[in-house]
Image (cartoon, grey):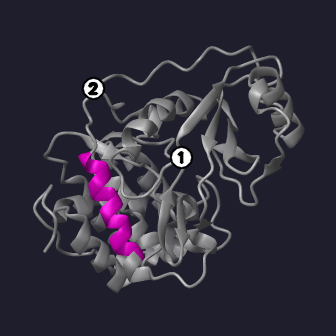
Amino acid sequence: MTPVPTPVPSPPAADPPEITADLVRRLVAEQLPHLAGRAVTPVPRQGWDNRTFRLGDDLTVRLPSAAGYVAAVEKEDRALPLMAAHLPVPVPVPVATGRPSAAFPFPWSVRRWIDGEPLDHARDVDRDGLARDLAAFLVALRAVPAADGPVAGRHSFFRGCHPGVYGDEVAEALVRLGPRVDAAACRAVWQDAVTTAWPGPPVWFHGDVAAGNLLVAGGRLAAVIDLGTCGVGDPACDLVVAWTFFDAPERRELRDAVGLDAATWRRARGWALWKALVTVAGMSGSDRDGGQSRALAAVLADPVVGGTVVGRPAG
């Protein structure tokens, strides 16, 4: 497996400039003149790591929002074409890469536009079917050749590593939250998670399988986007969506189709616990909509007991 590439050097800058449609037009005109003149419009719902703009009808421009997300540009340029040939639904395919400049200090990318509605804003979703669709995607992702993939680490914000890497944060969150949570139950879930480990060779993981990164059409999974935290390692982190989006019967649909063992689900539950605790405690983002509070309740109530032999589909 190859190490993650060193980010492209950029001119000294404390922060990038405000990322606007005018900036995107300027960058495209300067560096990709064959694409100049196309309409540039921000997408309605922006992510945290990047700012995204449509470029005409069939392309998007993505610009890292901070230096910590720069390494993902080159990583996705290498990984996405490799993955695309093996996956049952589309992922964004790179078209071109922009270089750091006086106007913008980081590399940036142009990708194919994929039609679909983000799951967190979609209506009339076939939720059981979606659970099976997502499981099929994750099974296929694990089967993508991993020999040259980037080993999980800082570039993936330690997704794909053992969840114990965040043990100190779990402990601090429990102190901050005090009687607001059942600390004994949380510690039991965490201990159950960190006493297991991935027994097989490293496999590809997405790293941020969340409703905002899943596109649906006709009620079913249409595409998976935002693979900036991808890498090769332990796939347990990709199961967190079982508690953050699905209800208990749907979790079982996902479990039965995804083909992962009970120990992996225990680590996944630990990942979901960590994310919920640090968010509710205000250590990472905020829980304004109560989503992570609901996820924490689901994590404590439902361990998704069961699973299958690693690498072998359920059923």
Q: Secondary structure at mark 2?
A: loop
Q: Which residues are the magenta region?
A: 130-143
Q: Secondary structure at mark 1?
A: loop
Residue 85 drawn above or below residue 314: above
**In the rendering, at what x and y percent does residue 174 appear?**
46, 61
Q: Label 1 amino acid? A: Pro
Please tell me which residue is depicted at 33% across the width and 85% down the height of the picture: 249
**In the rendering, at what x and y percent does residue 265 appear?**
25, 64
**Mark-to-mark CA distance, 1 and 2:** 23 Å
Question: Is 303 within the magenta?
Answer: no
- Front-most of 262 and 78? 78
**In the rendering, at what x and y percent does residue 17 appear?**
83, 31
Quadrant containing the C terminus in the rendered view: bottom left
Quadrant containing the N terminus in the rendered view: top left
Q: Which residue is mark 1?
A: 92
Among the 4 quarters of the image, the one containing residue 20:
top right
Please tell me which residue is depicted at 53% across the width and 77% down the height of the picture: 218
Q: Residue furthest left?
A: 309
Q: Which residue is mark 2?
A: 1
Instruction: Estimate how packed mark 2 is, as few (under 14), some (14 to 19) or many (20 or more) residues with alpha carbons within 10 Å.
Output: few
Please tell me which residue is depicted at 53% across the width and 52% down the height of the picture: 225
Q: Label 2 amino acid? A: Met
Residue 16 drawn above or below residue 302: above
Q: Mark 1 or mark 2: which comes first in sequence?
A: 2
Residue 160 appears left or right of 103: left
